[in-house]
């Protein structure tokens, strides 16, 4: 969620994140650490937890994974209190600013305020410029900080009215957890682009990006926070409100394809089942005679299972993943990224040699993974290699919080199917169609009048205005902060 005027200038600044919140448990920090650990796939660059007790806030924020920073009792014991929020940050950038690590914190006249954000605001640069002109002093380069300044400078009295007014001014995708003194706040933007669920653990309330973070602590899933809903949780219980003008629901379909954990259930759909169904659609749409279906692990596994079941072709683990290497995307330079792919996968010659192979992966972004995997599978003796992708071609960048490179680096934005097959080095290549994808989600196909998901990365139809990206505005002055990094 770093701020950027034009994401096409720099593909490094887009992030996904994981958020978690607890109200009403003596072990709020430990529960938050566990929740963040379950959400580690959403952000591995930095993690932070803020707790509240008796008029005081406690915070620990650090670069690295949750286990690196929050496994010690000595850290957790310095985070006392019955309410807590936490945040995992994902970024491909290497030069992270410590001050960008969330939850962000500020002192308002009414008390302390901590906030964690998943998503990306699309008018943060424009708002920031106005606020800076009015004298606001920004402490970070994140888009999230504009929310804090909008609340601080609001003409309204209560924290609820101030927060609502602030969020009415921002555009983009946001799922938020916040702590204002002893009150836990959760919000989902009116389009509901990013996930947020509500759970109960003993007497405590839990907010989390995904249900897998409820499961880890044994919390009960209550429901998804609705698009445009704001919940306030305090000693009087939970209060729900819908203060924003209703907008068409546009949950990010890429969460189902790749981002969310397969054991999570989002808006009533289990992610693993959704991925398997996409694989089935892919088999129906792009059948090919072959001996074996092999997933690109781990992201291609559920779709490959669905494909193999539908096609009646044996499923084998022909590529083994080394789990001790981070996601390929996190490597900061092209050179290292290539190295990362080699470090990450190895062919299992036993199931490949002399066979016609169907490789299944969830998506192709730059094509780096596919090129390496195909090379590896051929070297292991495959007689034919067919690639099947469980998403439509990624042809547009995401501005709502999923890390995607600029368009000129998206393989499918620059090449047709035939060219892509040649670059990747496969005998055939096919992507599931957008209608097939929607069918897998239980719909009749994509209804052009009211698509129920945000699929901008495939369709180029952006449901939320891209104010910062459609105007020719100069970048905000961030050089001072960068020097301090
Ligand atoms: P590429 O190698 O550039 O074609 O990237 C495709 C691979 O990266 C696929 O195996 C995906 O599982 C994974 N992937 C797709 N989108 C993302 C993303 N936003 N962040 C991290 N990894 C991704």
Image: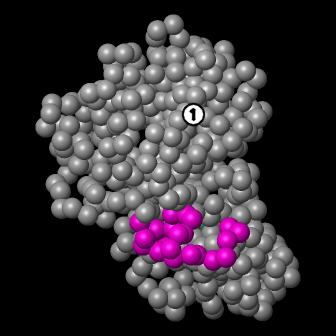
Quadrant of ligand 1: it is bottom right
Q: Determine crowd level at label 1: few under 14, some 14-19, many 20+ residues with C-alpha closer than 10 A.
A: some
Residue visible at 34% across and 53% down in the picture:
122
Closer to the camera in the image, 346 or 194: 194
Q: Position of residue 324 (x, y in %)?
A: 64, 50
Residue at the spot of label 1: 240
* Residue 226, above or below 355: above
Residue 49 lies, in percent from the top left, at 52, 27
Q: Give the position of the C terminus as an image quadrant.
A: top left
Work out whether residue 234 can be spotted: yes
For the point 60% across and 15% down, the residue is: 235
Quadrant position of residue 463: bottom left
Residue, x 26% and y 27% (percent of image)?
155
Give the magenta-colored segment's residue range. Answer: 441-462
Q: Position of residue 10 (x, y in %)?
A: 31, 59
**Image coordinates for residue 397, horizontal then vertical, percent:** 41, 66
**Along the viewing direction, whichever of 214 and 235 lies nearer the viewer:** 235
Decide if residue 463 is on the left or right side of residue 108. right
Q: Secondary structure at mark 1?
A: strand
Horizontal side of 370 relative to 311 (left or right) equals: left
Q: Is residue 460 magenta?
A: yes
At x 67% / y 71%, what residue is drawn? 443
């Amino acid at each position: 969620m770093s701020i950027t005027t034009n994401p096409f200038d720099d593909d490094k600044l887009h992030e996904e994140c994981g958020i978690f919140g607890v109200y009403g448990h003596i072990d709020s920090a430990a529960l938050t650490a566990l929740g963040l650990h379950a959400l580690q796939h959403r952000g591995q660059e930095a993690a932070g937890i803020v707790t509240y007790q008796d008029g005081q806030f406690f915070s620990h924020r650090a670069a690295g994974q949750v286990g690196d920073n929050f496994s010690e009792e000595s850290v957790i014991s310095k985070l006392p209190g019955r309410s807590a929020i936490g945040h995992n940050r994902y970024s491909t950038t290497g030069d992270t600013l410590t001050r960008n690590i969330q939850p962000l914190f500020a002192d308002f006249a009414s008390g302390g305020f901590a906030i964690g954000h998943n998503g990306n605001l699309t008018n943060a640069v424009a708002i920031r410029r106005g606020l800076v002109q009015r004298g606001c002093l920004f402490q970070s380069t994140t888009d999230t900080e504009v929310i804090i300044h909008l609340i601080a400078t609001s003409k309204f009295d209560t924290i609820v009215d101030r927060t609502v007014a602030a969020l009415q001014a921002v555009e983009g995708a946001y799922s938020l957890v916040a702590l204002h003194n002893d009150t836990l706040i959760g919000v989902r933007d009116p389009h509901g682009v990013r996930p947020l669920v509500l759970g109960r653990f003993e007497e405590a309330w839990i907010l989390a990006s995904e249900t897998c973070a409820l499961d880890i602590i044994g919390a009960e899933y209550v429901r998804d926070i609705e698009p445009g809903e704001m919940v306030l949780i305090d000693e009087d219980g939970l209060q729900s409100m819908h203060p924003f003008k209703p907008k068409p629901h546009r949950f990010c379909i890429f969460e189902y394809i790749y981002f969310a954990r397969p054991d999570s259930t989002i808006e009533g759909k289990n992610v693993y089942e959704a991925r398997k169904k996409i694989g089935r659609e892919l088999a129906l749409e792009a059948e090919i005679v072959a001996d074996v279906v092999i997933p690109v692990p781990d992201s291609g596994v559920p779709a490959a299972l669905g494909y193999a079941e539908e096609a009646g072709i044996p499923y084998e683990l022909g590529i083994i993943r080394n789990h001790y290497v981070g996601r390929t995307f996190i490597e900061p330079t092209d050179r290292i990224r290539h190295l990362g792919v080699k470090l990450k996968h190895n062919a299992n010659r036993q199931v490949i040699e002399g066979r016609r192979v169907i490789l299944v992966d969830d998506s192709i972004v730059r094509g780096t993974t596919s090129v390496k995997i195909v090379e590896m599978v051929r070297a292991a003796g495959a007689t034919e290699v067919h690639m099947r992708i469980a998403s439509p071609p990624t042809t547009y960048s995401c501005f709502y919080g999923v890390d995607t490179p600029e368009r000129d680096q998206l393989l499918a934005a620059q090449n047709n199917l035939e060219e892509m097959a040649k670059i990747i080095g496969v005998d055939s290549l096919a992507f599931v169609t957008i209608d097939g994808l929607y069918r897998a989600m239980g719909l009749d196909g994509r209804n052009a009048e009211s698509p129920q998901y945000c699929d901008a990365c495939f369709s180029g139809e952006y449901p939320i205005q891209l104010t910062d990206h459609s105007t020719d505005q100069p970048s905000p002055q961030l050089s001072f902060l960068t020097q301090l990094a």
